[in-house]
Structure formats: C-alpha cells, structure tokens
Amino acid sequence: MRDTKESRLLLVLLIAIAFALITVDIRGGEESPVDGARQAAASVFGPVENGVAAAVDPIGNAIGAVRDSGDRHDRIKQLQLENAELKQRLGSDDRNRSRLRQLDGMIRTAAAGQYGIKGAEVIAIGAAQGFSWTVTIDIGAEDGIKRDMTVINNEGLVGRVTTVGSRTSTVLLASDPDFTVGTRMEKTDELGFATGQGDRPLLVQLLNGKSKVKKGDRLVTFGSQANKPFVPGVPVGEIVRVDPARGDLTRNVYVRPYVAFSKLDVVGVVVQAPLDDPRDTVLPPKPEAPKPTPTVTVTVTPGVSPDGDEAQGENNGEAEEDGQAQEDGQAQDEQDPGAGDGDATGQNDDN
C-alpha cells in the first residue's frame, strides 16, 4: 500500500475502532458484546494453534532432554570426582596411620638403643649412584647428614648413607651384595660378617667354625670404629638355616632380615651414637613358647564298671557264693567221714 492521505486516514480510523472495541469489551465484562466474536475466533484458530504446538513440543522436549542430559552428566562427573577424592583421602588416612605406627616404633627403637636419630622419608628407589639396592631419602647435608651414617627403621637395620646432597641422600641397603656389616649373636656373643644377597637371606660368616647356633637365633650389629658406618646393637635378623659344621675355621648361617626392604617408607638416620653398647636390649622380646596341654589317661580294669558300685556288688556276690560252697563241703564231710578214707584206702590197696 502506498503512503497516501487516504491510507493514513484509514489507519487512524482502524486504530480508533480498535480502542472503541477494547473499551466496550472491558466495560461489558462477562456480557461483553464482542465475546461471541472471540469465541468464533477461538474455534477457528484453536486447531491451528494446537497443531503448531504439537509440532513444536517435541523439539522443545528434545532441547530440554539435551539440557537435562548435560546436567546429569555434569552431576555424575562431579560425583565421580568426589568419590575419587574421598578414596584418596581415605587412602591418605590409612597411609598416615601406617606412618604413625612406623614412626612410633622407630622412636621406641631409638630410645632402647639410645640413638639420636633424624627422621626421613623414602622418596625414590633405584640405581641412582650405580648401586642395585639403594633408596633416596629427603634429608641431606642441610639437615646434618653425613656419609657413612647408620640408617634404621622401626624393625632394625636398613643400611648406611653413601652419598649426601644438599637436601637428599642415597642409602645403600643391607640387602645389596656390596653391603657388609659386623654382627654379634644374641647371648653367645659369637661374631661374624653379614653380606647382602638381594632378595635372599643375608649370608653371615661366623668367625668360630665350631660355634653352637641354631635356627631362630638372632643377631645385632657389632658396631664400627668411631661408630661409622655402623652403631652397635641394631637388630639385623634371625637365622633361618645353618650349614653343617665341617671343621673349617668359619661357619656359614643364613639370616632373614627384620626389615622389609621393598616396603620402606619412614626411616631414621642415626646422627648421634649411644654412649654405651646396647648389645641385645634393642631386640624385641621373644614370644613365650606355648605351654603343653596336660593329657589325662583313663585305664579301665576288665570286670569293673566305671562307677565301681555294681562291680563291687558283683565281687561281693561271688565271695558269698564261694563261702557258701565251702560251708556245704564241710557239712558233707562231717556227715560221711569215711568217704574220704575209703577212697584213700582203695588207692593204697591198688598200689
């Protein structure tokens, strides 16, 4: 439509009519004169609106489903992260409890041996310095660590410090084939030298070839001059096998170490040696041998019942019968005194 004077007048007229109808509809309320026209329009355009809504609703539902699916995915991911964090927290708590037990045991060991120690954590394993059985700990020269210091944990001898950095140190484990430590037998004081054999028991060569040793005997470190590299009295292990004595100057035994070298976590470096040799005092107390259970043997005499009353009655009855028989025999002899003599006479005549 072209913008002319007539078209403008028509637009103004339509707007005026619209306002007039709106005013009449509002004032009429439920009895509005345009209510019939509204119902007629609803009957005409209602099916069209329903069709459009039916066509649009699946799309809207799909959009809502995608949005809800994303929300659920985010929630599941959040729950998975929370679950993983909870598991990690629980694992950390278990590890902390394990460390606390190790630290407490190590403090007790140090107190028993009067060792001055500095705690450390194993942070790496491997051949950092060309050794096959080594670990790296998180303390070094800045913490007062020096080469050839003894390393222990709550179970016993771990090894010795071989290399010292500013904040880390390398420890040669007692299981390394290049590791050797002097040992002392518990109680008997037999001396020897223990050598590492990897994941096998330590080989201990006793200096006395005729020493009396047996499976289960325990050893501690003998100590070194000036307490380097080993302080005395540190538990080493217990004998699991003894080679037969062959008259040699030395004798070989095999010792299972107390320390589990594949599970090292918290260790202590002995920075101050004891004033006196603790000897066997650091060894844990031996478990008491189980007491033998007493056994009771019951012997049943033939003809005697377990309660004894019935058997006693039977014995009394038999005694009474024997006494009655003897009385009957005596009475018969008194009545016929010649019977026995006749028999004896007849036997003499035959003779």
Image: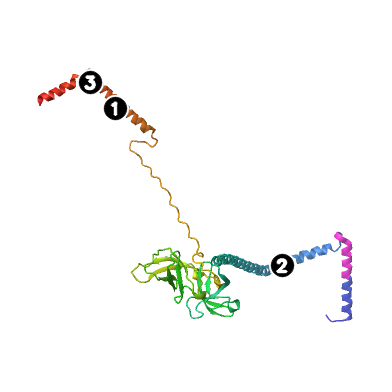
- Percent coordinates x, y for residue 267 in the rendering: 55, 71
Callout 2 touching callout 3 (CB < 8 Å): no
Q: Identify the residue at horizontal 87%, vertical 78% (top origin).
A: 7
Q: Which residue type does callout 3 highlight?
A: Asp
Residue lying at the far top of the rendered structure: 335
Question: Which residue is nearer to you in this view: 70 or 266?
Answer: 266
* Residue picked out by circle 1: 322
Label 1 to label 3: alpha-carbon separation: 17 Å
Report the disc number at residue 237.
none
Report the disc number at residue 53.
2
In terms of image quadrants, where is residue 44?
bottom right
Q: Nearer the viewer, mark 2 or mark 3?
A: 3
* Residue picked out by circle 3: 333
Find the magenta span and give its range.
17-30
- Percent coordinates x, y for residue 48 in the rendering: 73, 67
56 relative to 131 in the view: left or right: right
Q: Which residue type does callout 2 highlight?
A: Ala
At mark 1, the secondary structure is helix
Q: Identify the residue at horizontal 89%, vertical 80% (top origin).
A: 5
Position of the C terminus, as image quadrant, is top left
* Mark 3 burial class by Cα count in 10 Å: few <14, some 14-19, many 20+: few
At mark 3, the secondary structure is helix
Q: Which residue type does callout 1 highlight?
A: Asp
Question: Which residue is nearer to you in this view: 328 or 191?
Answer: 191
